[in-house]
Amino acid sequence: MMTVHEVSKLAGVSIRTLQYYDKIGLLHPSKYSDAGYRLYTDTDLERLQQILLFRELEFSLKDIRKILKSPDFDRNKALDQQITLLKLKKEHLENLINFATGIKLLGVKYINFSTTDFSAFDKSRLDEYATRAKAAWGNSPEYKEYEEKAKNRTPEEDQILNRQCMMIFREFGEIKDTDPSSEAAQALVIKLQSFLTEHFYKCTDKILSGLGKMYAGGGEFTKSIDEYAGEGTAVFVNEAIQTYCG
């Protein structure tokens, strides 16, 4: 784990920015020291990486929070979108460099700006793709329901809900060495589904099945669950969910 000072130095982000991300519910540290200092895990750093990539692409914090909170969020899909946007940004910058270089070579006083091609300044392709990327995460009925339920919650209330959700995973962790089709495991699946439906969005069996695969698919979710509830918990949760969903 890393302290806020170490993360700040590693990522080139100010301590004040990290504190603000925590305050608005964008990036909570997984743990705190006995003295109350923020401690960041590899999972937290992975999320920070996603945030910084989106920020580099000029997404607002509101849009980034929406994307990362979306029940449909897929890390690999997001990376693909980020790569495409970065390539478009690179192309845009290269066009600007070529434009400026051409002016320098010809000399400003010999340029007829009334007939100059200003297409190098055109960001329409970049803006259009960015708009589509944002919309891809926010148009589902589930996300709209989530947004409606979340709009009046404070960051502190979000943290409480997140802790309550993680406590359900801890209950899974306590029985992860048993049969995922057992009565106890299936009861926890129902508890998790009901919790998500009550506080976030209608968690259908189809959505629940997708969440289970995401929990066990590696990356941020798997690490968070296993760090909190014990190694192997995420896979066990998925097995119990898939049994339940048939």
Image (spheres, rainbow, N blue to C red):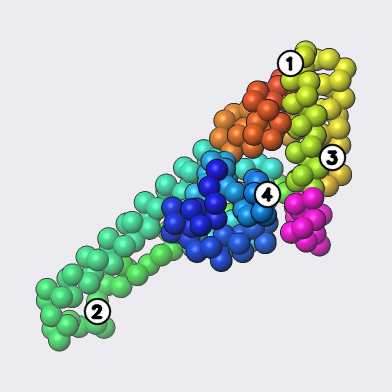
Say which label, 4 or 3, has the lower sequence index: 4
Tell me if residue 221 comes above or below residue 243 in the rendering: below
CA separation in Å, label 4 and label 3: 30 Å
Asked if labels 2 and 3 touch by Cβ distance under 8 angstroms, the answer is no
Q: Is residue 103 above or below residue 216?
A: below
Q: Quadrant of the N terminus?
A: top right
Percent x, y of residue 48: 53, 51
Q: Compute the Cα span from label 4 to label 1.
A: 31 Å
Residue 176 can be seen, yes or no: yes
Three-letter amino acid code of the residue under disc 2: Thr
- Tell which tag, 3 or 2, sits nearer the viewer: 3
Q: Dot 3: what SS?
A: helix
Q: Which residue is mark 2?
A: 115
Which quarter of the picture shows residue 221?
top right
In the image, 120 versus 180, the foreground residue is 180
- Residue at point 54% right, 51% down? 3
The residue tagged 4 is 34
- Answer with mark 1 or mark 2, whichever residue precedes in sequence: 2
> What main secondary structure does the magenta stretch of the protein show?
helix
Q: What is the magenta range?
A: 145-160
Residue 127: image x %, image y %? 47, 61
Task: Please name the amino acid that badge 3 sits on.
Answer: Phe
Instruction: Check residue 195 in the rendering and tell me which mark sits there, or answer none.
Output: 3
Check disc 1 and report the residue beneath it. 177
| Picture layout, residue 24 above or below residue 189 | below
Mark nearer the N terminus (2 vs 4): 4
Q: In whole angstroms, how far apart are the C-alphas of marks 2 and 4?
A: 67 Å
